[in-house]
């Protein structure tokens, strides 16, 4: 087939990454994500220009996923952050703010791009080495014998998303549900399988958040037009079930590029229906009491199974297949061939449950690490944001099983690392500078740029116009109310730091975060007196997610700074 239009040549543009248009676009993105950062972040409404619904959110995946960008550098930045979020769920806004700040500040440095990238890599390694060292004063080890640190972390995640529209009491309640589900899905020594369980989220719009519930097993919604009524025989123990992943609607399968010949007088639909009835007879003979199907079950097969006391549920969808298989021990059946006995699974009990105006079948297994959380909230926007936030909390809790450490939140970790890097940069040995092939002034310029970018993230948590201070002993963040002057008695206006770990004490020296000050070495955790620790719940972040967020931000910024050409296909 000939082309209707002549193919256009690709367009190559050189050196666009120092242009004013890029810096302006980066500034817009940075201000947008920074305004959403933290528990008091502002909400954004995302609307497709060609129509569709409006999404109200401050959650990074929803925010970045709803953006339409034309500049290749911005597309690269957003793609990198979204890839981080898809793997770690948390710290997406943090990584985006840090990356934008690094690019903007590094572009104005009187240092070659090659040296800037090399030195940023060195500073990145220094930061990560410190965060993973035993001397790090801004991380806390998770003690799984006590729930306080896990609850504080979960509470921090839920409080950071104001679109969930939850009170303090509701945040505490939802935190308990998520932690309970997390502990439930961790297998113990008596569990036959050592696989981590699954948590399924079921959303209900209308009821209060306090009507949310933790449910062992799986909830399957009943269609309004077909209320399933399990018979008394299904309420016994050891209910035998079959799980089908193929369609049982009686249609012929896809023949691909091949052809199918049908003999004269043969009706393919009747042949398929006869095979379905044969399958139904086999299920009845095997004493199967329940049939679950990912797709559609033919009405005639449904009727046949119902007449023989078999409960059928179809249109489950792909998302439920793996949890159902893990929970029941059933192997998904993908053909109409004779079913093997080892493919069947079992349940302990089937009951009915109702939440709001929705009705569910509750499948309760004998012993499983699969559970469900019913998420209730007042309207569609708050339900969607609560679902995304709970999924983030659940995923980041899973990361603690591999790396049981948490970081102090509220901007304290960023300010603490910046103070640590500034101190290390002030005492760097000449031999290290020779290895890096840079001068002391060049190293200090890049280090100040790196630290200023971290401090910019810490300042992003303040949205009411107040000043952000840092103490010159621990390097934590302290927020001042907007009505209090920095020149006045500012120490009287702050009581606890951003992470809620430290409380105000007399004789503490202060500085406005980001302003010039004498480098100092932050104290180790062992040097802090227990009497100075606040008694309030801590604000915590995931160590694993934040470390990767720092790496992604620095690597992406280095890549954008180093790019010199754009090759764009115009077709």
Image (tube, grey):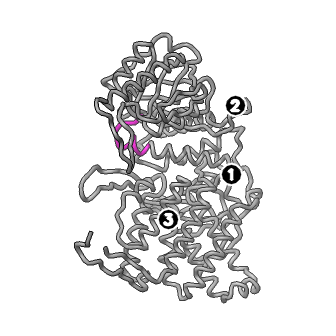
Q: Quadrant of the C terminus?
A: bottom left
Residue holding disc 1: 403
Taking the spot 44% from the left edge, 53% from the top edge, the residue there is 59
Taking the spot 56% from the left edge, 22% from the top edge, the residue there is 347
Front tag of 1 and 3: 3
x then y, percent, for residue 92 = 50, 59
Q: First in sequence, mark 2 or 1: give its number.
A: 2
Q: Quadrant of the N terminus?
A: bottom left
Q: What residue span does the magenta drawing correspond to? A: 375-386
SS assignment at label 2: loop
x then y, percent, for residue 207 = 38, 30
Q: Furthest-top residue in view?
A: 232
Q: Is residue 398 above or below residue 266?
A: below
Q: Is residue 535 above or below residue 444?
A: above
Would you say residue 338 sits in the magenta stretch?
Answer: no
Front tag of 3 and 2: 2
SS assignment at label 1: loop
Residue holding disc 2: 191
x then y, percent, for residue 519 = 67, 75
Q: First in sequence, mark 3 or 2: give its number.
A: 3
Residue holding disc 3: 80
- Determine the CA span between mark 2 and mark 1: 23 Å
Q: Is residue 73 visible?
A: yes
Taking the spot 52% from the left edge, 14% from the top edge, the residue there is 235
Nearest the eye: 121 or 289 = 289
Q: Is residue 405 above or below residue 30?
A: above
Taking the spot 41% from the left edge, 82% from the top edge, the residue there is 16
Mark 1 packing: few (<14 Cα in 10 Å), some, or many (20+)?
A: few
Would you say residue 378 sits in the magenta stretch?
Answer: yes
Q: Is residue 357 visible?
A: no
Mark 3 packing: few (<14 Cα in 10 Å), some, or many (20+)?
A: some
x then y, percent, for residue 522 = 70, 66
């Amino acid at each position: 087939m000939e082309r209707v239009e002549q193919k256009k040549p690709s367009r190559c543009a050189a050196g666009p990454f120092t242009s004013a248009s890029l810096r302006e676009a980066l500034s817009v993105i940075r201000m947008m994500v920074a305004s959403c950062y933290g528990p008091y972040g502002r909400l954004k409404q995302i609307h497709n220009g060609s129509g569709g619904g409006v999404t109200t959110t401050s959650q990074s995946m929803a925010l970045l996923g709803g953006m339409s960008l034309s500049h290749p550098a911005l597309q690269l930045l957003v793609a990198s952050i979204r890839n981080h979020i898809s793997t770690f769920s948390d710290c997406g806004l943090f990584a985006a703010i840090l990356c934008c700040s690094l690019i903007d500040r590094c572009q104005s440095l009187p240092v070659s791009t090659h040296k800037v990238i090399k030195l940023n890599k060195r500073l990145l390694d220094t930061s990560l080495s410190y965060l993973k060292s035993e001397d790090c004063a801004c991380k806390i080890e998770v003690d799984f014998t006590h729930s306080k640190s896990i609850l504080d972390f979960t509470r921090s995640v839920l409080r950071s998303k104001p679109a969930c529209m939850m009170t303090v009491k509701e945040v505490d309640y939802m935190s308990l549900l998520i932690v309970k589900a997390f502990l439930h899905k961790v297998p113990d020594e008596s569990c036959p399988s050592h696989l981590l369980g699954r948590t399924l989220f079921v959303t209900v719009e209308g009821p209060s958040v306090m009507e949310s519930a933790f449910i062992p097993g799986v909830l399957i919604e009943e269609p309004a037009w077909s209320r399933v009524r399990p018979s008394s025989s299904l309420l016994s123990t050891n209910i035998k079930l079959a799980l089908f992943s193929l369609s049982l609607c009686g249609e012929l399968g896809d023949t691909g590029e091949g052809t199918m010949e049908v003999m004269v007088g043969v009706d393919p639909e009747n042949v398929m229906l006869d095979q379905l009835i044969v399958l139904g007879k086999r299920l009845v003979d095997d004493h199967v009491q329940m049939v679950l199907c990912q797709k559609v079950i033919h009405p005639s097969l449904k009727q046949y199974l119902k007449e023989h006391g078999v409960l059928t549920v179809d249109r489950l969808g792909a998302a439920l297949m793996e949890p159902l298989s893990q929970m029941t021990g059933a192997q998904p059946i993908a053909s109409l061939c004779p079913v093997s006995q080892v493919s069947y699974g079992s349940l302990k009990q089937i009951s009915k449950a109702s939440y709001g105006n929705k009705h569910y079948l509750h499948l309760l297994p004998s012993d499983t690490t699969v559970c469900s959380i019913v998420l209730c909230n007042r309207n569609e926007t708050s339900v969607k944001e609560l679902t995304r936030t709970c999924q983030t909390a659940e995923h980041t809790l899973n990361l603690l099983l591999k790396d049981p450490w948490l970081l102090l939140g509220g901007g304290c970790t960023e300010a603490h690392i910046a103070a640590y890097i500034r101190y290390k940069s002030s005492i760097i040995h000449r031999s290290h500078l020779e290895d890096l092939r840079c001068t002391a002034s060049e190293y200090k310029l890049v280090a100040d740029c790196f630290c200023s970018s971290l401090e910019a993230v810490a300042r992003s948590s303040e949205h009411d116009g107040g000043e952000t201070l840092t103490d010159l002993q621990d390097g934590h963040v302290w927020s001042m109310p907007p009505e209090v002057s920095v020149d006045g008695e500012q120490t009287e206006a702050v009581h606890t730091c951003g992470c809620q770990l430290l409380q105000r004490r007399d004789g503490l020296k202060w500085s406005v975060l980001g302003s010039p000050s004498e480098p100092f070495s932050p104290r180790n955790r062992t040097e802090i007196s227990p009497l100075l620790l606040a008694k309030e719940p801590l604000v915590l972040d995931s160590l694993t997610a934040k470390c990767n967020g720092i790496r992604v931000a620095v690597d992406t910024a280095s890549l954008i700074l180093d790019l010199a050409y754009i090759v764009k296909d115009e077709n």
